Image (spheres, rainbow, N blue to C red):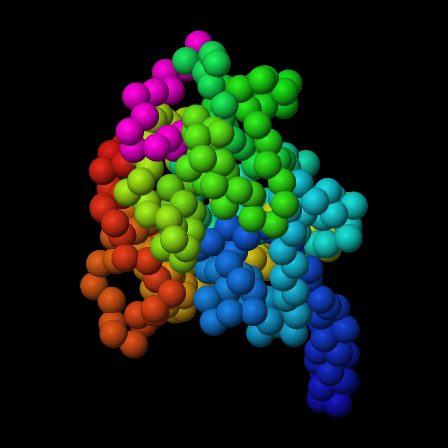
């Protein structure tokens, strides 16, 4: 009996010794990654903490520009990145379960007559993109080969820079996820209604993840812990409680509602002043999501 107890204590000590600090990097990309010091740090941040911290790990969030985030994680200066699709960093270790969806669009001023219909429609246009982002579709190769249409933006808040440039008519448009644009315009002096979608980068939404460094020996373990943890959060209702703070539905169970920002019926206790009130129903923007 004593030997059994001793074995259990050794195993518990060993598992505790493996608990460590997991540094996750990203740029500001609310509702996925918001202000890490706020009560609404982003739902991916909250999921990571809800999964890893009960097991003794400590999650540290560092926000910087996206290209730097990927570079640092690849060099093992951080353990992972938040809000990545596979195309962002195909060499990274991705969990089995995704943590959201993304569908990028070309945004233009509401009075613009331009529409994106393919490569030929880009001729003579100035379209803002964020340095290091993978947008999908046929635009990624053009951006990588420095097509003159695409103007890259860096820094801590590149989307805000692109909005200012668009409002000053120094850009014809920019590419962004409508969920992200709506959250940003809710928190500053811009209005979502001032912009419209001139076309989609891809027809289908793509999965988003917390992805782990290809050069960290623990990445496979972290990815497995996260996948199993998300399944448990979904089973016990904690996942939806987190999503309620951001006015979102479960992307797996209701992808159309997740992309629409349709709040549905929420308990008053779950409501947050940080949540945007949709200026119009984004369901109309995602008819086939």
Q: Is 256 displayed left or right of 23 in the figure?
A: left
Q: Residue furthest bottom?
A: 2
Can residue 183 be seen here? The reply is: no
Is residue 111 a member of the stretch shown in magenta?
A: yes
Locate residue 49, reporting x and y percent: 56, 67
At a point 59% along the width and 31% down the height, the residue shown is 152
Asked which quadrant contains residue 277, the reply is bottom left
Locate residue 166, reporting x and y percent: 44, 34
Is residue 59 a member of the stretch shown in magenta?
A: no
Asked which quadrant contains residue 85, the reply is top right
Can residue 165 be seen here? The reply is: yes
At a point 77% along the width and 50% down the height, the residue shown is 76
Locate residue 80, reporting x and y percent: 66, 52
Q: Is 9 displayed left or right of 129 in the figure?
A: right
In the displayed structure, 164 sits above or below 124; it is: below
Locate residue 241, reporting x and y percent: 37, 68
The region drawn magenta spans 106-120
């Amino acid at each position: 009996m004593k030997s059994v107890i001793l074995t259990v204590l050794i195993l518990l000590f060993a598992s505790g010794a493996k608990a460590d600090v997991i540094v996750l990097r990203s740029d500001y990309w609310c509702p996925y990654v918001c202000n890490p010091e706020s009560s609404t740090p982003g739902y991916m941040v909250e999921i990571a903490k809800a999964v890893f911290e009960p097991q003794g790990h400590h999650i540290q969030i560092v926000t910087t520009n996206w290209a730097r985030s990927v570079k640092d994680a690849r060099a093992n200066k951080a353990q992972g990145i938040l809000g990545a699709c596979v195309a962002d960093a195909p060499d990274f270790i991705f969990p089995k379960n995704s943590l959201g969806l993304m569908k990028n669009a070309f945004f233009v001023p509401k009075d613009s007559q331009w529409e994106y219909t393919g490569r030929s429609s880009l001729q003579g246009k100035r379209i803002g993109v964020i340095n290091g982002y993978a947008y999908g579709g046929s635009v990624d190769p053009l951006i990588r080969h420095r097509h003159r249409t695409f103007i890259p933006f860096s820094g801590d808040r590149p989307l805000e820079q692109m909005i200012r440039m668009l409002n000053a008519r120094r850009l014809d448009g920019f590419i962004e996820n409508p969920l992200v644009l709506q959250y940003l315009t809710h928190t500053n002096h811009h209005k979502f209604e001032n912009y419209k979608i001139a076309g989609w980068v891809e027809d289908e939404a793509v999965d988003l993840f917390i992805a782990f460094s290809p050069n960290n020996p623990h990445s496979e373990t972290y990815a497995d812990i996260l996948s199993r943890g998300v399944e448990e959060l979904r089973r016990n209702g904690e996942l939806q409680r987190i999503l309620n703070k951001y006015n979102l539905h479960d992307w797996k169970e209701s992808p159309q509602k997740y992309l629409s920002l349709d709040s549905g019926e929420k308990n008053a206790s779950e409501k947050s002043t940080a949540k945007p009130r949709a200026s119009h129903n984004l369901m109309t923007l995602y008819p086939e999501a």
